[in-house]
Amino acid sequence: MPVATEELKGEELEQWNACQSKVEELGFSSEEAVKFLNKAFAWQKGYWGPEKTKPEAPSTAQIDAVISYLDELGVTDKDLAGAIKQFPQLLGMKVEERMKPNITKIQNEFKIKGPAMKNVLKRKPQVLGFNWDCYGDCQGNCPRCWVHF
């Protein structure tokens, strides 16, 4: 597993440090922030599979977009911290490409809106990253599958 702070240089390393500070401002330790950024930006591959084929330098704009969107959905700071702790990959999710379509799917297909939506995001923030549906005929992409919802 590559180590981001050893591989990133110059502006990318500055971005990493800025992102780490941003995550720490949410109430996490330095070690937790590093762990979460590693997972969110594919420095630890477990979750991403083929979607992110190589690690990315984190972006404060990306993290700000995620935090802003979750704020729009009514997620409190306390619940945001809980969601990040439970599912740090959400910091690396693209709002327009993944999160908004997933919220739309939850609202339209599962008829969950308003306060119930906030409870879903609090209880299972992984829904923001789902991009697969095996319809009960397992295809081995379980961490990203809607069947768990």
Image: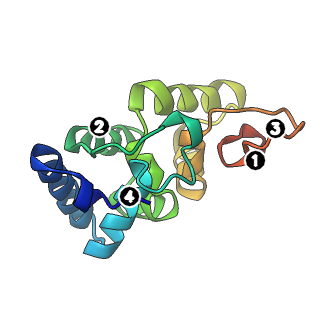
Which residue in the structure is indicated by mark 4? 2
| Sequence-earlier tag: 3 or 1 | 3
Circle 2/circle 4 CB separation < 8 Å: no
Amino acid type, label 3: Gln
Image position, residue 64 (x, y; %) = 25, 42
- Is residue 50 visible in the rendered image? The answer is yes
Q: Secondary structure at mark 3?
A: loop
Q: Is residue 104 left or right of residue 21?
A: right
Examine the image and state in which quarter residue 59 appears: top left
Q: Residues within 10 Å of mark 2 (few under 14, many from 20)?
A: some
Q: Is residue 69 left or right of residue 125?
A: left
Q: Residues within 10 Å of mark 1 (few under 14, many from 20)?
A: few
Relative to 116, residue 86 above or below: below
Q: Which mark is residue 139?
A: 3
Q: Residue at x 39, y 61 (%)?
A: 36
Circle 3/circle 1 CB separation < 8 Å: no
Relative to 61, residue 81 above or below: below
Relative to 112, residue 105 above or below: above
